[in-house]
Image (spheres, rainbow, N blue to C red):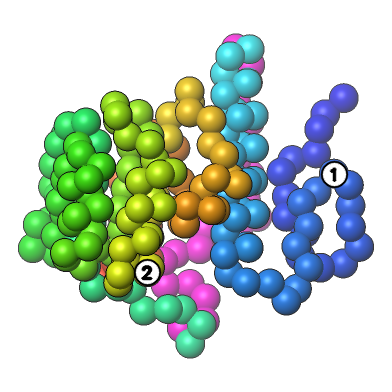
């Protein structure tokens, strides 16, 4: 017997097999529900992989929405600040800098939670990307500390998660986590995310 796929129902009658959100609701409530669905999908894919079963191909009736899709009047302007990478090494930072170009977007790196908090306190940071596999780093605690800094309430905290990481949507929501990206992260996904959350301009074709 197959389980229903993760889905979010907005309004209408409650259905036991789906997550439901009744309007009106705050943006943070929607983000928390979407993060929960992503976590469920992540666990389902990990289970299929552990069983050696083939992953189901994604089927879409329409193309993915681009970073400029939607109503312009409803989109918040991106914050003008740098990207902070919290990781055990600088390889991901170097890859990201090479991908977008150092002149287009400032990218910083640290392997220290206290230094990450200090950087977010002293300089404008649009996005803080935390590798959950970085040793000695509590991703939820670090996100909470970053968001507690004056002026950092608009900093988007994104977690980079691997298959062995158990994402807790309740902890993430309480810590102010904006979302997560499954590793390895594709270059296209990285660029689209940065175009949504930072001042990164359109990339040349």
> What span is in magenta?
52-72
Does residue 67 belong to the magenta stretch? yes
Say the numbered circle drawn on residue 138: none
- Marks 2 and 1, the one that precedes in the sequence: 1
**Which residue bears the numbered disc 1?**
17
Measuring 21% from the left and 67% from the top, which residue is drawn there?
124
Residue 158 drawn above or below residue 28: above
Quarter containing the N terminus: top right
Q: Secondary structure at mark 1?
A: loop
Q: Is residue 92 visible?
A: no
Measuring 60% from the left and 47% from the top, which residue is drawn there?
170
Location of residue 195 (image quadrant): bottom left
Query: Picture coordinates of residue 129 (x, y %)?
Result: 32, 48
Left or right: 202 as drawn, with respect to 197? left
Query: Picture coordinates of residue 3 (x, y %)?
Result: 81, 33
Residue that sits furthest to the left in the current view: 103
Query: Picture coordinates of residue 122 (x, y %)?
Result: 16, 64
Does residue 71 belong to the magenta stretch? yes
**Which residue bears the numbered disc 2?**
154
Location of residue 13 (image quadrant): bottom right
Q: Is residue 120 visible?
A: yes
**Label 2 to label 1: alpha-carbon separation:** 34 Å
Query: Picture coordinates of residue 126 (x, y %)?
Result: 28, 64
Quarter containing the C terminus: bottom left
Residue 53 drawn above or below residue 187: above
Which SS does the magenta portion mostly show? loop
Measuring 57% from the left and 34% from the top, which residue is drawn there?
42
Graded by Cα atoms within 10 Å as few (under 14), some (14 to 19) or many (20 or more), the crowding at tag 1 reads few
Left or right: 35 as drawn, with respect to 157? right
Residue 152 drawn above or below residue 56: below
Q: Secondary structure at mark 2?
A: loop
């Amino acid at each position: 017997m197959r389980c229903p796929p993760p889905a979010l129902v907005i309004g209408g009658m409650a259905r036991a097999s789906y997550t439901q959100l009744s309007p009106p609701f705050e943006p943070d409530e929607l983000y928390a529900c979407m993060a929960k669905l992503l976590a469920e999908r992540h666990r389902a894919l990990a289970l299929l992989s552990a069983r050696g079963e083939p992953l189901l191909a994604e089927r879409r009736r329409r193309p993915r929405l681009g970073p400029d899709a939607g109503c312009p009047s409803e989109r918040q302007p991106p914050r003008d600040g740098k990207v902070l990478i919290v990781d055990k090494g600088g390889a991901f930072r170097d890859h990201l800098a090479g991908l977008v170009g150092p002149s287009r977007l400032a990218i910083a790196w640290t392997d220290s939670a206290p230094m990450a908090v200090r950087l977010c306190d002293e300089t404008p940071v649009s996005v803080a990307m935390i590798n959950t596999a970085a040793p000695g780093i509590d991703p939820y605690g670090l996100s909470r500390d970053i968001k507690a800094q004056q002026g950092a309430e608009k900093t988007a905290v994104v977690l980079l998660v691997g298959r062995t990481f158990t994402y807790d949507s309740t902890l993430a929501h309480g810590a102010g986590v904006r979302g997560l990206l499954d590793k390895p992260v594709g270059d296209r996904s990285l660029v689209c995310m940065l175009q949504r959350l930072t001042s990164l301009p359109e990339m040349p074709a």
